[in-house]
Amino acid sequence: MLVKLRDLASLVQGELVGDPEIEIKGVSEIQKGIPGTITFLHMSKYKKYIDTTKASAVLIGKDHSLDDISLSRIITDNPTIAFSKILDYFVPSEKHTIEIHNTAIIHESVKIDDNVSIGPYTVIEKDVIVGKNVKIGSNCMIGKNCLIRDESELNSLVTLYPNCKIGMDVIIHSGSVLGSDGFGFATEKGTHKKIPQIGGVEIGDNVEIGANCTIDRGTIGNTVIDKGTKLDNLVHIAHNVKIGKNCLLTAQTAVAGSSVIGDYVAFGGKASVAGHLIVGNKTQLAAKSGVTKSLEGGETYAGMPARKILDKNKQDALIGRLPEIVHLLKDIEKRLIDLEKNE
């Protein structure tokens, strides 16, 4: 597939600088650029490859100053979104085959709408409702009383325990488990007694759940992930957690039971939140942060325990000076001893 550079600029509504007649056949990495492709510069640390890349054009944001190069380029307000459009152009999403495989085991009470695909060896228990254009991969397990709304996609080996509600246009990647029991135990006479977990899981519209995530059912009531939120791989959401709209939770994040996460919250990798806390709207947590008390929204936090990142940076700077401070204290101590001897 060949396309003129000017047509790609039109596709992403970008400003074209250079030769509009260049023919582009695909995309490539900036450090491994291929002639006849367009590449992508989104972080300053990759700017060093601009002079050596063999790609024929580059997509950049308005914040990158590249007036001194000869490489043809498309300039946009949001190069990441623009690049996703270009990727879709060259590698469009595959249309799923509409087929219910003959090895799938589906209870007679299940309601299946139009254009649904169900893969080999998937099991769907009684009273499940499957909406229009849903794709369910192979070897999935859908427990009783689950709801999967229109346009959603469950990849292979996804498990939904009973009473999970999946919104519209949701993507759940392979190996994820929704509705498993929360970690609830009461101790009596040295023995841990299991607390029944009788709630469910509710996933809002346009949520994406990465591979090998676990989302526990509520003890009473539902664990909720609101619309537009995206979970990376290996994320654990405990029982009765409420996660707001359009949050981003990256790999190995964990949120303990009954905590409430606001809207537009972003967690770095391995960030964690203790139980029964509130994290306010538009909070950002740096990687490996540990939240031990409720946090106000609109701030960036880091460290364990998590605190405002400016405070943490100041403390880290002081910790870096500890050897110098210890040496200074020893010198002061020696001088004081010398003064006492001379009295």
Image (cartoon, rainbow, N blue to C red):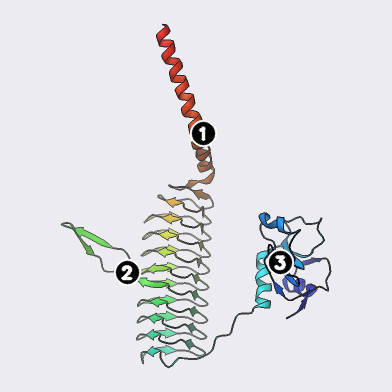
How many neighbours does mark 3 have within 10 angstroms: few (below 14), some (14-19), or many (20 or more)?
A: many
**19, above or below 253, in the image:** below
Provide residue 139's location: percent of width, then percent of height: 41, 82
Badge 2 amino acid: Asp
Q: Which residue is mark 1?
A: 321
Q: Answer with mark 3 or mark 2, whichever residue precedes in sequence.
A: 3
How many neighbours does mark 2 have within 10 angstroms: few (below 14), some (14-19), or many (20 or more)?
A: many
User: Quadrant of the image for the C terminus?
Assistant: top left
Badge 1 amino acid: Arg
Cα separation between marks 2 and 1: 47 Å
**318, above or below 179, in the image:** above
User: Quadrant of the image for the N terminus?
Assistant: bottom right
Q: Which residue is mark 3?
A: 33
- Front disc: 2 or 1: 1
Q: Answer with mark 2 or mark 1, whichever residue precedes in sequence.
A: 2
Q: Answer with mark 1 or mark 3, whichever residue precedes in sequence.
A: 3
> Which residue corresponds to the image point at 41% horizontal and 64% vertical from the top-left?
236
Comparing 9 with 228, the one in front is 9
Provide residue 16's location: percent of width, then percent of height: 80, 67
> Which residue corresponds to the image point at 44% horizontal and 64% vertical from the top-left?
235
Left or right? Give the position of 235 relative to 195: right
How many neighbours does mark 1 have within 10 angstroms: few (below 14), some (14-19), or many (20 or more)?
A: few
Badge 3 amino acid: Gly
Provide residue 27's location: percent of width, then percent of height: 69, 71
Left or right? Give the position of 124 relative to 60: left
Cα separation between marks 3 and 2: 48 Å
Comparing 322 with 74, the one in front is 322
- Label 2 residue SS: loop
- Label 1 residue SS: loop
Comparing 258 with 82, the one in front is 82
Q: Which residue is mark 2?
A: 181
**231, above or below 148, in the image:** above
